[in-house]
Image: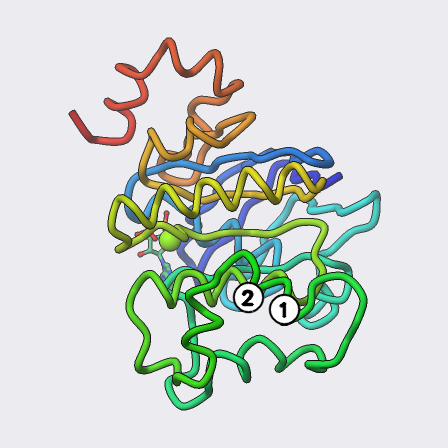
């Protein structure tokens, strides 16, 4: 359903994504792993139509239709949502304002404010708090909640567990698995191998902009030593 073929992309003269091919099928969780600076966010930004980077060559298609050249707004309209690295919240907007920015609070279809508050009760308690007053965990939940409010079929999650306490990481893993059960597809950028293997169906490992390893989570579970080497952890 999402199909990336031989993607080259970079910033100015620097090419940082070099021939990446990757698929996300309906209802699948695909993890994109790699150390710092390996090109994970660049791939995500290319899918979402965010500039920079610039796409040099290759293709990105969604349901058979090319996404290249479309703006982020149009891509969101095609039901692809992003949980950006670093969350990108607005310090002065409240939790409710973040969630209803793209959808009216009274909307009845798909994901509603009540439904997001249902899976993140903590956000309901904090609904009048501003972005700048939230804890790391709450910011993470809000970024996921905001993505859900566009009723996505695919969510691009760029290190959603970054900076979270282990208990929050587990909570988030549970949410990701629940979303998959509802038929959502997720492309999950992670640095934490265990977190990725816990939820993903398939895994790709990026190294300096190339896919150096890919397989099902089941296959890679037996190769964690190789992966740890690739990812630079013991
Ligand atoms: N706006 C930019 N301008 C120039 N170079 C950039 C820019 N953003 C990223 N890069 C470079 O592109 C390469 C890939 O960066 P990218 O952000 O895609 O890596 P990443 O795998 O997401 O890393 P991290 O795990 O640290 O988020 C890095 O060498 C980085 O320095
Ligand atoms: Mg990144």
Residues 158 and 50: in front is 158
What residue would you read off at disc 2?
Answer: 117
Element marked by disc 1: helix
Distance from Cα at disc 1 to Cα at disc 2: 5 Å
Tell whether 79 sits left or right of 209. right
Q: Quick one: quadrant of the C terminus?
A: top left
| Mark 1 neighbour class, 10 Å CA radius: few under 14, some 14 to 19, many 20 or more | some
Residue drawn at (74%, 80%) of the image? 106
Does label 2 point to a residue whose CB lies under 8 Å from ligand 2?
no
Q: Is residue 5 above or below residue 165?
A: above
Does label 1 point to a residue whose CB lies under 8 Å from ligand 2?
no
Tell whether 65 sits left or right of 169. right
Residue drawn at (50%, 67%) of the image? 52
Tell whether 160 sits left or right of 226. right
Return the x and y of residue 42 as percentages of the image width and height.
Answer: 47, 53
| Mark 2 neighbour class, 10 Å CA radius: few under 14, some 14 to 19, many 20 or more | some
- The reply to whether discs 1 and 2 touch (Cβ–Cβ < 8 Å) is yes
Residues 29 and 40: in front is 29
Q: Quick one: quadrant of the N terminus?
A: top right
Q: Which mark is residue 102?
A: none
Residue at the far bottom in the pictured view: 92
Q: Is residue 138 above or below residue 130?
A: above
Element marked by disc 2: helix
Return the x and y of residue 25 as percentages of the image width and height.
Answer: 70, 33
Q: Is residue 6 above or below residue 155?
A: above
Tell whether 121 sits left or right of 105. left
Residue drawn at (61%, 37%) of the image? 6
Return the x and y of residue 15 as percentages of the image width and height.
Answer: 44, 50
Specify the quadrant of the image occupied by residue 207.
top left
What residue would you read off at disc 1?
Answer: 114
């Amino acid at each position: 359903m999402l199909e990336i073929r031989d993607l080259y992309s970079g910033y100015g003269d620097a090419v940082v994504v070099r021939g990446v091919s990757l698929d996300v099928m309906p209802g699948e969780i695909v993890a994109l792993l790699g150390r710092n600076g390996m090109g994970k966010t660049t791939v995500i930004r290319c899918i979402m139509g965010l500039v920079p980077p610039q796409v040099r060559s290759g293709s990105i298609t969604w349901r058979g239709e090319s996404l290249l050249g479309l703006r982020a707004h149009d891509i969101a309209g095609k039901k692809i949502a992003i949980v950006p690295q670093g969350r990108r919240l607005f310090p002065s907007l409240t939790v409710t304002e973040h969630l209803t920015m793209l959808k009216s609070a009274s909307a009845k279809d798909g994901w509603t404010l009540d439904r997001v508050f249902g899976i993140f009760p903590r956000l309901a308690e904090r609904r009048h708090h501003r972005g700048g007053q939230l804890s790391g965990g709450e910011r993470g939940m809000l970024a996921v909640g905001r993505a859900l409010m566009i009723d996505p079929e695919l969510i691009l999650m760029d290190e959603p567990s970054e900076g979270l306490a282990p208990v929050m990481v587990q909570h988030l893993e549970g949410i990701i698995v629940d979303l998959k059960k509802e038929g959502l597809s997720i492309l999950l950028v992670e640095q934490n191998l265990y977190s990725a293997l816990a939820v993903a169906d398939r895994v790709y490992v990026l190294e300096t902009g190339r896919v150096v390893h890919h397989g099902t989570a089941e296959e890679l579970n037996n190769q964690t030593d190789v992966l740890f080497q690739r990812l630079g952890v013991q």
